[in-house]
Amino acid sequence: MLILTCPHCGPREERELVWGGEAGIARPDLSCDDVTWTDYLFFRANPKGVVLEQWCCAAGCGQWFKVARNTLTHEVLGTWPHAADPDLDALGKDEAQT
Amino acid sequence: MSAPFRLPTGGLIDRGRPLGFTFDGVAMTGFYGDTVASALLANGVTIVGRSLKGHRPRGVVAAGVEEPNALVSVEGGGFFEPMARATEIPLRDGMRVRSLNAWPNAHIDLAAMMGVGSALTVAGFYYKTFIWPAWSAYEWIVRKAAGLGRLPRRSGPDPSLHAHESIDVLIVGGGPAGIAAAETLAGSGLQVVLAEARERLGGSLSRQSTIAGEAGGDWLRQSEAVLERSGNVAIGRRTMVAGAYAGNLFVLDEKDGEGGHRLYKLSARQVVLATGAIEQPLLFANNDRPGVMLADAVRLYLEDFAVVPGRRGVVVTNSDSAWELVPKLARAGVAVAALVDSRRREACRHAAAIEALGVTPLFEATVTAVRGVGGVRGVSVSRQAHPAETVECDFLAVSGGWLPLLHLAAHRGSRPRYDAEAGTLQLTRWPDGWHACGSVAGSASVEAVLLEGAAAGVAAAAALGRSVRPAYEGRARPRPAIQPPIQPMPRHEAKVWVDLQADVTLRDVRIAAAEGFGAPEHLKRYTTGGMAADQGRTSSLNLLRSLAEVSGRDMAGLGVTTFRPPFAGLNMGAIAGLRRGALHAPVRETPMLAEHLALEAEMGEFGGWRRADHYRSNAPDREKAVSVEMAAVRNAVGVFDGSPLGKVEIAGPDAARFVDRFYVSDMIGLKPGHIRYSLLLREDGIIFDDGVAVRLSEDRFLLSPTSGRADQVLFHLERWRQTEWPDLRVAIASIGSQWATLALSGPASRQLLTALGPDFPVDRESFPHMRFREGRVAGVPARVARVSFTGELQFELSVPARHGAALWRRAMEAGRDLGVRPVGIEAWLRLRVEKGYIHVGVDTDGRTLPDDIGFGAIARKKAADFIGKRSLDLSYANDPDRDQLVGLLAGDGAVLEPGGRILAAGHARPPAPVDGRVTSATMSVAAGGSIALAMLRRGRERLGEVVAIQQGGRQLRARVTEPVFHDPAGARLRA
């Protein structure tokens, strides 16, 4: 089980949290073409390595926050309030993908 | 009855505390300190159970968690373990022990006598046999034959507890290595847990051996005293570490020895792995006979329990460790008829010492078969350049090398590899923060083990920024050169058991390899080898070895199957903990519960709420009660407890813009005091929920999600607010539990509301349909919505929760002359079917789009973006062949039920393509018969058509209609 540090509540067990998939998925506007829309709906990068995710501190403050997690090792590289825009490259994303 | 195989002296048992117990009904005795297995052996019980498929007699093989055969049910003071390893259960007075998979008992098993199981033993049997005509034809008999043990009728009185802890260092294993690490960390101030699966510390340490210059027993006592005094090392006895997970989280199962469990979820900053190794059996014909035991288990029963498995034994091995057993047996007065070693004499370090005892070892020799059925009568030994000979004996001690218990590291993703020189699996890279020591890391000598344990303690402390002195210092003697083990492969493959618990033979391995299941992961699944409750502890290595042999491949190149948690089976009660009975899935109650019970409500669980299904005070019979309740709503007035209905308030300057982005209908144009019914979609266009939205004021909305989905809707709203539109000035609050809701429904509901004394007018002109009023009713603050779920005139009355029960009583009283009835959820849902109102999740599913239920025009009309809108333009959303909501009116007096399949046009009975499904059904007074809602392909074009419906095993006919059967013009609604 992962222990993630909620930026507002501190370290919390995975079962108190809800996973919300990759962060930073831009929502296209109505005028986009079908492919853009279906890519938005269904396609994710799903990297083997570091990914920036959204998690919700569901049993605590209820706030969504961002987590950089290595999908291969479960190593957590950092957590941030949702409004933050952390630089994954600075966290060694490239090394982790090898 | 005396215990014939108990030695008069010795052991760690408390001879001053004799215990009585029964095995399959026969009274026996043991001592405090015994396990069930040691007590059975002391009493001369050779057959403790029957094998899973072949019902062959089986005896105790091992002394710990690896035991494959001795599975028993144990009943004692207030607890029942349906399936436990006899080697792990501490004996207690009055225990009733029963063998599993045997009837009437292990000794005389009828299935074995009739040979019932033998046909089921071949690899892949299930896959090959039960494929025609259908698995379902065989399922019942296979289910009956499958599995071991019987579940207790009642759960035990003491639920298991769960605990969550976070510590500095977890030491797994309380043998010499783990103790040395713990002693090193004692007094360091670090929070340390030492977990040992058995009742006693010491692991495989022999009490008679010398360790750190002392007798094993003395050393152990002193070390335990050091740990007990330390104040920072907690010792968990009978505590199995069942699994290792990301973030160094561990699951530990602590047994109290009386049937109780405590399950810990423990996160540790550093880990010392000192789990040791498990001895492996050798392969030869009839190697599953009772009396064939692992050599180290024989030693343990002898030293710790003063129990011998027989009077005259043979030891067979391919390594040094089993040689140490010979003098111990001799001292206990047990004859050693032969010591059989597959190696050459030069490879055996102890040869001279053993010969000095008068035992003549047989080198370059192997046991080829065991003689005897219910026990061992002798063994056949084959030796190079000698004729095969028979050695008489009544037990056989086997040692085929050691398997390090590196399973926990493997749970974390480390991949063990077969090392040909060591003849076993090994790990070279451990997970981060783990320090392996002792025989799990390949050490053999006890000095090396202590030094490694101490070093592991130092390393764990250093990683946490602490400097500690190792409890043991010095240099170990260099380890002797390892001789690669020799594993002669036997003939008579059908009689050679590779996995005792899963009942897999060498022939099964050959069949699997020949049929193309020759990869270890395939072999495991095809033969079930390694998949039984013992998790292949004594079989995984031999399975690999056998596979290499039969397929002529190199063992190191085969790879290893994945080790997954749990390390050994966990009791289901321990996993459930307190989450059972009423706490399994707690059900919510409304403030009016006592009123429902007073009216003899039949309560049930609906979407996580305890609600009234119907009221026996209306009629004792369910169907009659439901018709009385429906008639009250149609002709007079019914009162329904709608408190579980979701209530979410949205407030802020951007409230209207925010709400508008969720609904398929326009919400910006909704006027204060007005109500709109609409749908919420998922982003892929599928209907997520429905409900009404009330505009309380310019900047406030009240949403009413479906009762069972209120939490999900709240989560959905909040997620979009935080992650997508944080710029909108809006706040969301769930106020559902603050309000009790009564729905007054029926033509007399206005009179009933008037009788309750509202402080605002409720006449048709002042308070029309789909309007909302705030004021006071019956003297308490009230929010009243004129909405309807039944198709009748209806007022939904919400008051602060504490007033709910009183208001309910007043409504029932005030409505007496109006013919009021309490209405349960069954009548409520049938009334809406008659009106053609959908229930999301019942009439819709994970494919239903707004247009499918007649909401297409509304969704298209709204120009502004809302969640799911763009998906409604995708090609699949506009396929004319989609299922659409229709009504069905049954013909010929048939009664429609949900779940019926509508057959394609032109088909009266199956086989036929399916064109749709019946989603809800009821008897309708308005329609004069059985009606239903259904999703039907191109349904709206097919009104008037008669369709055939496959329902249960029968065919019915029904006419396709509009979904609304009651008051299609809505005059009653707007009355």
Image: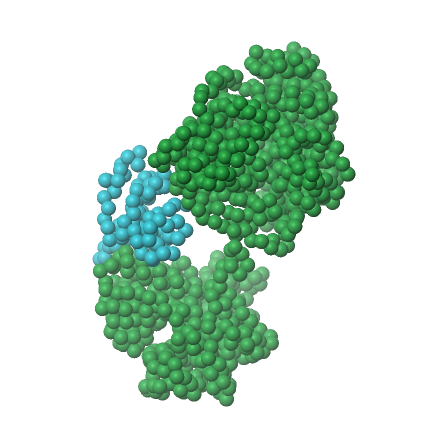
Which residue is depicted at the point 60% across and 75% down?
B621
Please say if B711 is above or below B573. below
Which residue is depicted at the point 62% across and 41% down?
B89
| Quarter of the figure that contains the N terminus of chain B | top right
Which residue is depicted at the point 48% across and 59% down?
B914
View extreme (right): residue:
B1
| Quarter of the figure that contains the C terminus of chain B | bottom left
Please say if B692 is above or below B290. below
Q: Horizontal placement of B518 versus B248: left or right?
A: right
Q: Is residue B255 visible?
A: yes
Quarter where residue B953 is shown? bottom right
Q: Is residue A51 visible?
A: no
Chain assigned green = B
Q: x, y percentage for residue B487?
A: 57, 21
View extreme (bottom): residue:
B817
Quarter where residue B313 is shown? top right
Please say if B345 is above or below B927. above
Observer-nearest residue: B870 or B590? Answer: B590
Q: Colour of chain A?
A: cyan
Observer-nearest residue: B56 or B355? Answer: B355
